[in-house]
Image (cartoon, grey):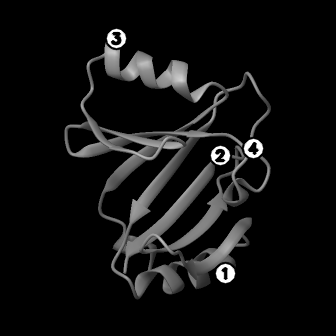
Amino acid sequence: MLDAIRSLDYVVVLCDDIETTRRFYADVLSFPIYRDWDDWIEFQVGATLLTLRERGRPEDGQSPPSGTTGVQLAFRVPPPDVDRCYEALCDHDVEIVDEPRTREYGHRTLFFRDPEGNLLEIYADV
């Protein structure tokens, strides 16, 4: 079922100082801002969104310590496949951080970790 993944949609960079990081991507690299919700800032970089957000949100489980690299990868699938992917990951004893659930912002999400402890997400627009 995990073969339903067809694209890398956005990358999330976890930030200790989101405003300084925002200025770097907007002013230094000149990436256009796609959406700015203060604690969630998306830049359009080609077909991918580069997203900045503060460390320590509930879906992190445990955020990497301050001063270390923090990247979250998000993979989009069709809505029914979020739960199917969850079952497939459980079959492989993958560490699940947050089981599938529908969020108020219009995504059905599933959070889990790779072997290095990086946070990964499978989501669908609902």
| Amino acid identity at mark 3 | Val
Q: In this view, does 39 lie to the left or right of 79?
A: right
Alpha carbon of mark 1 to alpha carbon of mark 3: how far?
44 Å
* Residues under numbered marks 4 and 1 in contact, where contact means CB atoms less than 8 Å apart: no
| Amino acid identity at mark 4 | Ser
Q: Could you tell me which secondary element the residue under label 3 belongs to?
A: helix
Alpha carbon of mark 4 to alpha carbon of mark 1: how far?
25 Å
* Residues under numbered marks 2 and 4 in contact, where contact means CB atoms less than 8 Å apart: no
Q: Nearer the viewer, mark 2 or mark 1?
A: 2
Alpha carbon of mark 3 to alpha carbon of mark 2: how far?
27 Å
* Residues under numbered marks 1 and 3 in contact, where contact means CB atoms less than 8 Å apart: no
| Quarter containing the C terminus | bottom left
Residue 118's disc is 2
Q: Could you tell me which secondary element the residue under label 1 belongs to?
A: helix
Q: Which of marks 3 and 4 is in front?
A: 3
Label whose residue precedes the other's in the sequence (3 or 2)? 3
Q: Nearer the viewer, mark 4 or mark 1?
A: 4
Q: Quadrant of residue 78?
A: bottom left
